[in-house]
Image (cartoon, grey):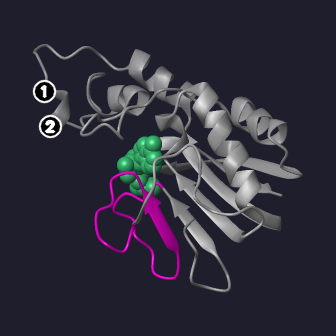
Amino acid sequence: MVQPALDVVRLNLGCGTDVRPGWTNVDKFPVSSDVVQADFPTLPFAENTSDEVLLSHVLEHFGFKDGETLAREIHRVLKPGGVAVIEVPDIAWCAAQFLGAPEPQMYTDVTNEYHTNHRWGLFAMALWGDQHNDGLYHKWGYTAHRLLYLLQHVGFARVEVDYGFSHGVQVLQAKAWK
Ligand SMILES: C[S@@+](CC[C@H](N)C(=O)[O-])C[C@H]1O[C@@H](n2cnc3c(N)ncnc32)[C@H](O)[C@@H]1O
């Protein structure tokens, strides 16, 4: 069981390269020794111990069952009144962009391209992940309703979902209070 060091405990789950000072940064593939290694969906933290959890562009990397387990785990480790901030690609927007973009007139090597002028660049990666390693495959998608109902279903007392833009795509930004 990992013991977070600070009084105000903030967990940045699936941090990737976004390693934040003052946070406990956690990832299956740590980019440095400052990052705690853990393989979700279970979390190596005791219940009611975290003030804030950040899950940015991570939930879609889990199938729907493991995604529900991860959401329950986040609820478990939060203190009463603690907040989870969860950002995921808006799958409906991504699918619409994919369908609306033209086919390229040539083969494209998706691993090296994030083009938005045809469908097999960024928009395909927003649907299926950029697949640069085993942690970067998308296994499920979320609309605003699906994310709202999931977070309510696992027990969050209050949930707000807004739209935003990051990582090149329209995103859903949820805040969920325990
Ligand atoms: C798209 S990146 C997001 C990185 C960062 N949070 C951001 O917003 O830029 C997804 C991250 O989730 C991590 N990840 C994927 N599957 C995981 C798992 N089973 N357990 C822990 N981390 C995982 C990946 O290693 C990767 O760093």
In the displayed structure, would residue 39 be above or below residue 45? above
**Residue ranking furthest to the left:** 106
Disc 2 marks which amino acid? Answer: Asn
Query: Residue 123, percent across and down?
Result: 36, 29
- Crowding near the residue tagged with mark 1, few <14, some 14–19, many ≥20 C-alpha atoms within 10 Å: few
Q: Quadrant of the C terminus?
A: bottom right
Q: Is residue 53 magenta?
A: no
The answer to whether residue 132 shows anywhere in this view is yes
Q: Can you give x and y, in whole percent of width and height, for residue 118 in the image?
A: 26, 24
- Provide the residue designation for mark 2: 112
Q: Nearer the viewer, residue 82 or 146?
A: 82
Give the quadrant of residue 97.
top left
Which residues fall within the magenta stretch?
14-35
Residue that badge 1 annotates = 109
Disc 2 and disc 1 in contact, CB within 8 angstroms: yes
Picture layout, residue 175 above or below residue 81: above
